Amino acid sequence: YAEATTEMRILLASVCVAASLAGASAFALTSAPMLRGSQLAAVKRGGVAPVVARRSGAMGLRAQVGGFVPKVKTMDDYFLMLKDERPTIRRMGYEALADKAIEDGIEDEIIDRLIGMLTIEEMQERRSAVQALGIIGGTKVLVPITALLLSTDDSTVRASCSKCLGAVALKNPETIQDFPQAALDGMKKAVLEIDDPVTKIATVSSLGQIAGGEMSSGFPGCSRALDVLCDILDVTEDMGLLFAAVNAVGTTGTSNPDMAPKGLKHLQMLKSRASEVDGFQYAEAMIDAAIDNLTGGGIVGDMKKGFADKDNHMARDAMTLQFSQAANSGMLRTESEYDMTFDEVDDDDDEDDVFVKPTFKSS
């Protein structure tokens, strides 16, 4: 380089600069990246989506000079991804479909295909369709899904419809308080009029999702969904449905303090009615636990006390007592090689023992 002429030095410097610029272009921002369905929905609603910088790398450089051009995926490609065994690929597929539905304005076409997938026997593929419908959300999903919930004779499709309604609330928590009343009425009808325990439990679970909201992110639940759950508590004599509804009402009141008084009122009404219905006595312990939790007592209250005092074991003791009561009443059934027995625990103090310890013996 020292012996080179001035012209050669200028030429070499120019080559170095050109190479540097080419290298920098490989790390430049490409076109705007595809947003997830929830991010895109936030943009549509006036929110701010995160800016994601992607490196084009060698692929981008080759594309610039007329070399390799990556294939653009079609809608059919994304639907095929829902069949993949890998959960990450399935998630990429249903999020991309939700993006296309919202961004390209083809909701009707994609929603129809996704609803058609609710009849598929393969569970993972069916769940992916439910998730995609949940992300898209809105009345274009809720109206046909509610109608299908009430019209189909296929219990698998009904359960998928119920889960889809809950997924809409889960994926779009900011819209929960405006959840359509027609959809809530349809869910209530499904619970009370369709003689299928799977449909009943799945629908109550989704109602609990809608009623509970997502308070950790600042989105309260829908009080009208709690009204539906309370109506179910007031009339049901189905034990499985009772347990699911009590849990949903208790959880909703715990996460949404403003709704606790209404839930408490209907739980107390249920307790007074339970003594008159054959078999309901088995549910009284659960009802009492839900009432205690809503009034600041029970296991939840004991847990809070335990957080403040490490020597406070009231929550553990209460759970152990409930466990033993369930076993003694015949509600608890073990499916293992062990039989379960219970021994009273002597805690070496002057108070009466209030909990028992499970021990096991070989069968």
Image (spheres, grey):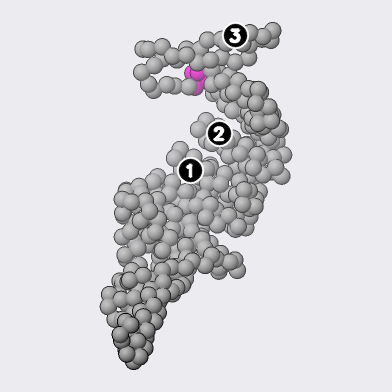
Q: Which residues are magenta?
A: 326-331
Viewer-nearest residue: 276 or 348: 348
**As drawn, 180 above or below 188:** below
Q: Do the numbered discs 1 and 3 sit on residues whose CB atoms are within 8 Å?
A: no
Q: Residues within 10 Å of mark 2 (few under 14, many from 20)?
A: many
Front: mark 3 or 2: 3
Q: At which x and y percent is residue 59? A: 32, 71
**As drawn, 159 above or below 61:** above
* Residues at marks 2 and 1, CA–CA distance in whole angstroms: 13 Å
Q: Which mark is residue 242?
A: 2
Q: At which x and y percent is residue 148? A: 44, 54
Instruction: Tell me the element at label 2.
Output: helix
Left or right of 86 in this view: 185: right
Viewer-nearest residue: 326 or 39: 39
Instruction: Tell me the element at label 1.
Output: helix
The disc, 1 or 3, on the residue closer to the chain's N-terminal end is: 1
Viewer-nearest residue: 195 or 259: 259
Viewer-nearest residue: 221 or 2: 2
Q: Which mark is residue 202?
A: 1
Location of residue 50 by image quarter: bottom right
Amino acid identity at mark 3: Asp
Front: mark 1 or 3: 3
* Residue at image coords 58%, 19%: 321
Q: Residues within 10 Å of mark 1 (few under 14, many from 20)?
A: many
Amino acid identity at mark 2: Leu
Q: Which mark is residue 346?
A: 3
Q: At which x and y percent is residue 281? A: 58, 22
- The answer, for residue 182, to whether it is visible in the render is no
